[in-house]
Every structure is written in structure tokens, then in C-alpha cells.
Image (cartoon, coloured by chain):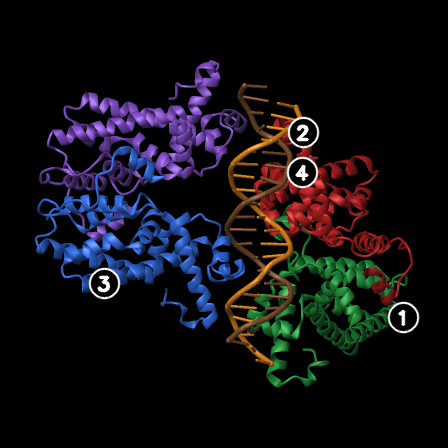
Chain colours: A green, B red, C purple, D blue, E orange, F brown
DNA sequence: TATGAATGAGTATTCATTCAT
DNA sequence: CATGAATGAATACTCATTCAT
């Protein structure tokens, strides 16, 4: 987890801090950002006092998680660019796989508090800038490749990504894969690939969503 | 609002009931379904006692709003089918305009409580069935028209719609319009229309989202 | 039920009043005097408005029930004196059978409110005086008969009676019959009769009491 | 107070816990078990949060008081057996003095909730068993002494005791002493002792009872 | 420093009583 | 007059945050 500020902490304190952030990340993702602080502390194996010593209030914790998460996301984006053969593939990989992306979007776009938070924090801002730069680079690259339609920008991608990823466990994996596929077809410079899975009727879909 | 059960209520009680549902709908949409009951009462111009007389607990209120809303959505779908020249246009109109759709999706798909609720309530179930039937009809119609790709079903539309509409005031109108346009291009049998507005860079997009 | 004040009421109003008192008596006995007014109204088949028109508040209702009940108890005492062959038998009958006694004791002795109430109400006071006079008469008579020990007074009987009757559905009928029998033996001028039923062990007793 | 579970608590928390139980015991005795939790907290000198941290709801508090109280009662019974010269005297002492007995009877016999509670709790069950064993022992001992009539069991004693003790501040001390004396006469193998105090008339008794 | 106890403001819900229909 | 709707004060319980140990 976060490496920016923990340098001065003793090893155990550091372990606690990282553990809290890891737990909070999971809890925010699973249960939402309103979940009781005490359970976060308990699941992290610390007392509430320790939690509050590290993070003076919920907002601070959200900020820390957001920062940590933006870091992870930046790394993911960097790796995607490095490892995928094309910008388009990097884009697809990001939209397909990113758990960190989902949380980042929730924390930095959805929650106004966390958004302001991420705004104030220099480390977070640095990560964010890196991510945005990478995203712009990916978009321009994919357009240069002729894979991505020319009339979209990184902002459009961000919006689609946030829509796609914004909801906890919405629908089945297949449903989300199909939705992504449809979006990618909409984004493509030329007409699309066949959809994964099979088309579901309205009723099946609703039954499956519960 | 709801016409199903209020028939026996005195005129003033009926007005209160409708007002409470209207306010709750708005509040649930704006602030989420956890918002204090007292403010719902206050904004509806009644005491908390009145609110609780009609709706024994928060769940009951959510159920009532869900039912009312599914009714409104069914009506909207019916009108869209009746008034639009083609099934494709009906589909676009639904995805474009539906505030009721957004709330319905939140209440009946997202919240497990409300989902179960809508399941138990016969009136709600009836509305839901009508909506799903209409959606299936629209999808088949649009495919017959050659406008909608053949490999999607109503379930895919529901998923896209719920993604598109699931978040309160996410992004600007233009951003959402562009996202919808991209999705529609992904859904089209043949390649798409030009996007509305202009492409934004990653940074602009994030600045604009707050 | 009460005949003292209802003379001016229309027949239906009178029926309502009597019904309310009958229901309240039962509810106070079964559920205690704190039970919701609305249920008393409902079980009496009237609206809460009607209940409150007749009895301005809970206290007034308790007073009315107490008055009504003291009347019934006075009648019961009168009958016991008239029908039983001896004063001792009258005493036993009162302690054995009186449901009205139980409620009266609850309402007029237990609850301070109702006690004051019974104090202020002339009709109630009249009944109470009659009951107390009858009880004194019974005690003196039973002592003259040589059945009741000479060193007790009506007050002792009242205390024993209130102890015996004060609790809702405490224990089984047999348990209470045995307790009464023991008390009567303690009250008798000469040593006692065999107890009814059989002796229970401590464990059985507690199991049975729940 | 309770020694069974508090061992792991910090000294101050332990003090609070004991204080809460002591206050609750008194309040339940004086005002009944429905009394506002907030006042119990206030009289114990703690915030409501502290009360609820230790006892998640009213039922848990009642259970805890019942357990604590059964422990005290068991100790009292043990002491009575140890210190009194005869089983009969031990019995009299228990019936005469036991404040804890009164509360225990209220909490474990009268209230269905507390009764179930005491049933589930192993510590409470242990105390209860000890008490019942002691009571059986006392009864058999007093019968062997020729002091107690042979046709009663510990169950009868429990019933009489619960009747005698079930009501808060019922009557004067003298009234209750006389009632107990009458009961004891009824329980004696041979005819009874003179009653303490003097006989009261019906009116005096009722005036005094409020 | 870590802990978890204490605090009390915040929120849901109930119910006695009043009042419009 | 009867009705039952409306009111709001009272009360149980939760949880973010502070503080003693």
C-alpha cells in the first residue's frame, strides 16, 4: 500500500496503517463509505483509538484510501500501456479488469467529500495527473491506430468507465462483459465484434440481478 | 401518484399520502434511501407521526415509492411505444429521458430490500411485468426494423440503462448524452451517428465532474 | 356495567361507553394499565375520538373502570354474605372467586393514580365504603362463629387478598388454591384442613410458573 | 455485584458495570422494568452509550440483573442455612428479609422475557438450581424438625414467597409482617403464634396501602 | 503508543391526545 | 356525535469521535 507518508512510522505502526487502508478499501467497496468505523478497526485488528490516531476522521481515511488507490491505479495504467501490444488493448484491459479503477471512481468521482479530499492531497493529485496523462496518451494512441473513433476524448472514456464500474456487484459477470462489449463497439472506429454470452430477455435479466 | 390503494382514504389523508410519496421519491433520488425520515416528513409538510401512520417503517415507504414509480415507468414506456414512430425511437426516448426509470432501477434493482419488497407486492409485480413485456416488445420491434443489432436482448438494454441512470447527478448533461450516444452506436445494427458536443480531455472531464 | 352516570346518554352512546369499560377492564387485567389506548378503542369497536370523548384521558378511564369494578365487587360481597351459610364461608368465597376483587385491588390499591382517582369519585367512594363495611361485618361475624382467629382484622384480610390476587396469571390454579388454603389455615381459629392437590418440589414449581 | 463475567473488564469499566446493575436493580424494583433506560444511565452516572455498550438492549440488562440477583439470593439462602439454628428459622429469615428474593421473583418468575433469559444463561441457571436445592433442603429439614406441616413442598413456599414479595412497596412493614405471620401459622405443623402488632380495621388498611 | 471505554448527538419509532371531516 | 387523521413529545438504540488507562 501507500509508501508516501509511512516512512517515519515504526514497523508495527506501519503494518497497522497499511492493514487499515487495505480493510477500508475492501469495506468501502463492499459496503459503501458509510460503514461503521468500528468494524473497519475490528477487521483491521486494531482498536478504534489506533484507527483515529492515524486518520483523524472518516474523511481522512477516505482520502488516504483514495490516494492509495489512485497510486495503484496509476501503476495499473502504466503496466497496461507497457504490456499491451496496442493502445486499444491497453484501454480494453483497463476497462475490463480494474478493481482499483472501480474504487477510485467511487471514491474520487462519486463521493463529493472524497473528491475534494483527493483534490487537496498533493500525492493524490500527482497520481491523478499521471493517470489522466496516461489516459490521454492511450486515447490518442488508439485513435492513431485507427481503432478508436476520432470524436471521443479521454473524458468520454472516463465517463463510460465510471458508469460501467460504479456499481458494486451489479449483475453477473457476463452481463457486465456484454455491456462493456457494447460500449467498446460504440467506441470503435469500425463496426464491432460479436458479443460474448447470449442475449437475455427482460425477465431473465431482472430475475438474475436480485 | 399512486391510485391503487388510496381510494378509501379521506381527501386530506390522500393528499398527504401522495405528497409523502412524491417527496420521498425526490429525496431517495437526490440523497439516497438512507436519508432521515424526519426530513421527508418535514418536506412533505406533515409530522413524523403521519408519515409513520401511512408507512410503518422505512421499508414500507420504499416499497410504496417503488410501486408508485414502477407504475409511472410503465406508463412512460406505454407512451413511448405509442408516440414514437419506431421501436428504436421508443428505446432511445426511454433511455434518454426517464427520471422514473432511474429511480425504479435504483429502488427495484439496486436495493435488496426494495427488490424483495417489489417482489412481494402484487401491484408492483404487475407493473414490473408490464414494463418487461414492453421492453421485450421494443427490442424485438427495433430488431425487426433493422435498427438494433440482433445479438442483444432486453436484458442487455436493462443493464445499460441501469448503468447509465444509476448515479444521481453524475457528470454534466452533455457528458451523459455523449455516453448514451456511444452506447446507442454500440447497439445499432449499422455504424453510428456523430456524437453530440465535443470530445473532452481527461483533465477537463475530471474537473467538470465534481 | 356502570349505571350511575350513563342515564343521560343516548342508547348507542351508552352501549359504546359500557363496551369501552368492559374492554378496558379486560385489557387492564390482561395487559396492565399501560396498554395503548388505541387498542382499547379498537377492541371496543369505536374510534379513538369516541374513547376520548367519553374519557378525557387514561386516568379518567382508569377511574371509570375502578368505579364500575368497585360496584361489581360490592355486589359480589353482598351476594356472598347473603348466599353463604356462614361469614367464614362468605370470606372464603370472596377470596376464592373474585375476579373483580383482583382488578379492584390492582386498580385501587396498586396504581397510585387510580387510588387517588377512586378517592375523588363519590360513587366510587360509596362502593368502597360499602365493601369495607361488608368486610368488617364478615370478619366480625366469622370471629363470632369461632371460625376466624380473633387477632386479625379486615385489614389483614385485605392485605392477604391483595397479595393473593395481585398477580395476573401467576402459577396454576392448583398452586393458587394451595396458597389460599395455607392462608386460610393461618387465619383459622383452630388448626387446619388438609391441602388440596399434592405437594410440588421446588423445581416443578418453578418450571410450572413461567 | 456480579463476579462471573467482569473479570476481563478494566477497573473503571467494571465499576460502571456494577453501578449500572445496582441502579437497574433498584429502578426495576421501584419503578418496574419498563422504566426509561436513560434514567438508569443517568442515575448510574454514565452516558446512554455506556449502558448500551454493556447491555445491548433492555432485555440484556434485565438478564444481567436477574443473574446478579439470583447470585445474591443464592448467597443469602446459603447464609440463612448456615447461620440459623433450625431449618424453620432459615425459612422464616428468607421470607422475612429478602429484598433480593423479591426482585428475583419479579425478574425470573413474573417477566416472561427475564424468565426465558434466566433460562438461557448458564450462570443464572446454576444459581437458580442452587437456590432450589437449598429450598428443598430447608423444607425437608423443617419438616424433619416437626416445625413445618408435612403436606407442603418447596413449591408452595415459593408461591407464598412470591405472593408476599411480589409488590413494590405494598402496605406498611407491619402489615406485611402480619401477613407473613399468618402465612407461617398456616404452614406450621402445630397451631400458631400470636400475631405481631395490632389488628387494623378495613379502613385504616386501605388508607395505608396507597 | 495502543487500546477500548465513555460520551452524546442523531435517528427511528411509538403512542397519548387533539382536531378536521 | 363518531371517526380516524395529524401531531409531536418521549424513548430506544447507533455510531462518530474523544479520552482515560
Q: Are marks 1 and 2 on the same chain?
A: no
Q: Decide: few, some or many residues near mark 3? Use Cα within 10 Å; few <14, some 14-19, many ≥20.
A: some
**Quarter-wise, where is residue D176 in the image?**
top left
Q: Residues within 10 Å of mark 4 (few under 14, many from 20)?
A: some
Q: CA–CA distance between discs 1 and 3? A: 93 Å
Pointer 1 indicates a residue of which chain? A
Q: Report in which chain the residue with disc 4 lies.
A: B
Q: Are labels 4 and 1 assigned to the same chain? A: no
Q: Nearer the viewer, mark 3 or mark 4?
A: 3
Q: Please name the residue shown 8% across and 53% down the image.
A: D146
Instruction: Tell which tag, 1 or 3, sits nearer the viewer.
Output: 3
Q: Nearer the viewer, mark 4 or mark 2?
A: 4
Residue C122, given in percent of the width and then of the height, sits at 40, 24
Point out which mark residue B12 bears.
Answer: 2
- Let me know if residue D159 appears in the view: yes
Circle 4: element type: loop
Labels 4 and 2 in the same subunit: yes
Amino acid at each position: 500500500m501507500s509508501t508516501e507518508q509511512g516512512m517515519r512510522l515504526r514497523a508495527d505502526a506501519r503494518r497497522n496503517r497499511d492493514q487499515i487502508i487495505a480493510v477500508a478499501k475492501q469495506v468501502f467497496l463492499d459496503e459503501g463509505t458509510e460503514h461503521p468505523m468500528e468494524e473497519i478497526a475490528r477487521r483491521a485488528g486494531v482498536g478504534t483509538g489506533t484507527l483515529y490516531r492515524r486518520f483523524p476522521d472518516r474523511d481522512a481515511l477516505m482520502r488516504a484510501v483514495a490516494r492509495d488507490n489512485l497510486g495503484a491505479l496509476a501503476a495499473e495504467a502504466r503496466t497496461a500501456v507497457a504490456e499491451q501490444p496496442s493502445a486499444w488493448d491497453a484501454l480494453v484491459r483497463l476497462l475490463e479488469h480494474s478493481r482499483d479503477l472501480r474504487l477510485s471512481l467511487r471514491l474520487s468521482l462519486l463521493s463529493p467529500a472524497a473528491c475534494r479530499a483527493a483534490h487537496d492531497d498533493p500525492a493524490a493529485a500527482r497520481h491523478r495527473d499521471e493517470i489522466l496523462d496516461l489516459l490521454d496518451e492511450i486515447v490518442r494512441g488508439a485513435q492513431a491506430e485507427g481503432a478508436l473513433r476520432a470524436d471521443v476524448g479521454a473524458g468520454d472514456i472516463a465517463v463510460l468507465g465510471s458508469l460501467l464500474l460504479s456499481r458494486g456487484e451489479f449483475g453477473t459477470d457476463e452481463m457486465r462483459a456484454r455491456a462493456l462489449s457494447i460500449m467498446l463497439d460504440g467506441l470503435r472506429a469500425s463496426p464491432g465484434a460479436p458479443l460474448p454470452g447470449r442475449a437475455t430477455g427482460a425477465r431473465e435479466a431482472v430475475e438474475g440481478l436480485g
